[in-house]
Image (cartoon, rainbow, N blue to C red):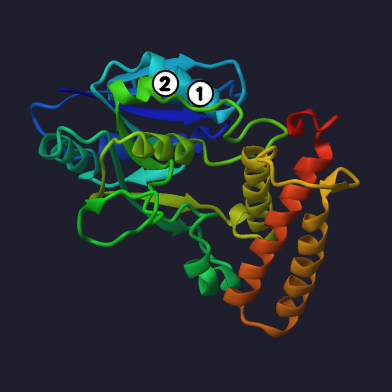
Amino acid sequence: MLITVAICTFNRAESLRRTLDSLAAMRLPSDLAWEVVIVNNNSTDHTNDVIGEYFDRLPIRRECEPAPGHSNARNRAIDAAKGKYIVWTDDDVVVGSDWLRAYVEAFQRWPDAAVFGGRIIPKFELPMEKWVAESVSVLGGPYAISDFGNDVQPLSVAENRLPYGANFAVRAAEQRNFRYDPNLGVAPNRRRLADEIDVITRLLQAGAAGYWIPAAAVEHCIGRERQTVRYIANYSAGLGETDAFRYMGDGAVSSLWLGVPRRLWARLAKRWVCYRFHRIVSPSPIWVVHLQGYARIKGMVRYWRQQKGWSRLH
């Protein structure tokens, strides 16, 4: 059985090097056939040079996707993959020594399942910001922290037991039928997220089976540039933009003010007041939650104001 490990990358050459070092250090079954498909999404740094350094250490195939956007890069990886399963990870992770072995064992144990996901452990660059250290429990989304326990269990949309994009696997046959929406995912001048959540949700809702594989673990490297209020706010605003894009035009909008549903203005004002108040009087985990709520609504408002003509409402 051939396995494809897929990585999409953009301007993270040295971070990618760290990821490839971890892939080269894995303990693998002696009979495993595998490939590493790396999609360079129009990087302007020395990404291609770094990839070239690993041709003699890893079974790498390099692809280029000129169209910007994470979903476009993922779809190029699907087209290039030769494996029966595509195991996805990111260019800012360190995979565990038994990461791929754990997935292969899961594929063999549950041959009828189409989706799998594993643990994502944050690895913070030091010195770690004090407020971040105190608030890790409420920063699962911004830092892609994923841990559903030590026992294998079914993935579930209803219970929100879904893997994140830095560590999941999809059987290639299903993956080719459930491609990534180019309107979702990070792209220039756009902060939309959840391209992988969209695919996994559609797969499970279509009847596919999926499993949480705790032994398939990776570390997500969190640099100090992400340990900032600005980063958390921008991520949360991206969630808001994603929400607005996905649900705009669902028939629930009755009136607009300055191009935005009136109810959103009220929610924005309330969230702003709560965040400012708790930033002064509350411990970090509390004001961070209010920061995320305020920024999420702000992202929704910004998305609506960017629209022209509101044609999707009619």
- In the image, is 30 to the left or to the right of 73? left
Q: What secondary structure is found at the residue carrying circle 1?
A: helix
Which kind of residue does numbered mark 2 sit on? Answer: Ala
The foreground one among 205 and 285 is 205
- The residue indicated by pointer 2 is 77
Q: Quadrant of residue 286?
A: bottom right
- In the image, is 275 to the left or to the right of 182? right
- Neighbours of disc 1 within 10 Å: few (<14), some (14-19), many (20+): many
- The residue indicated by pointer 1 is 73
Which kind of residue does numbered mark 1 sit on? Answer: Ala
Residue at image coords 53%, 75%: 134
The foreground one among 179 and 42 is 179
Residue at image coords 50%, 30%: 9
CB atoms of marks 1 and 2 within 8 Å: yes
Numbered marks: total: 2
Q: Classify the position of the C terminus by image quarter.
A: top right
Cα–Cα gap, marks 1 and 2: 6 Å
Residue sitting at the far left: 31
Q: Quadrant of residue 204?
A: top left
Residue 258 lies, in percent from the top left, at 91, 46
Q: What secondary structure is found at the residue carrying circle 2?
A: helix
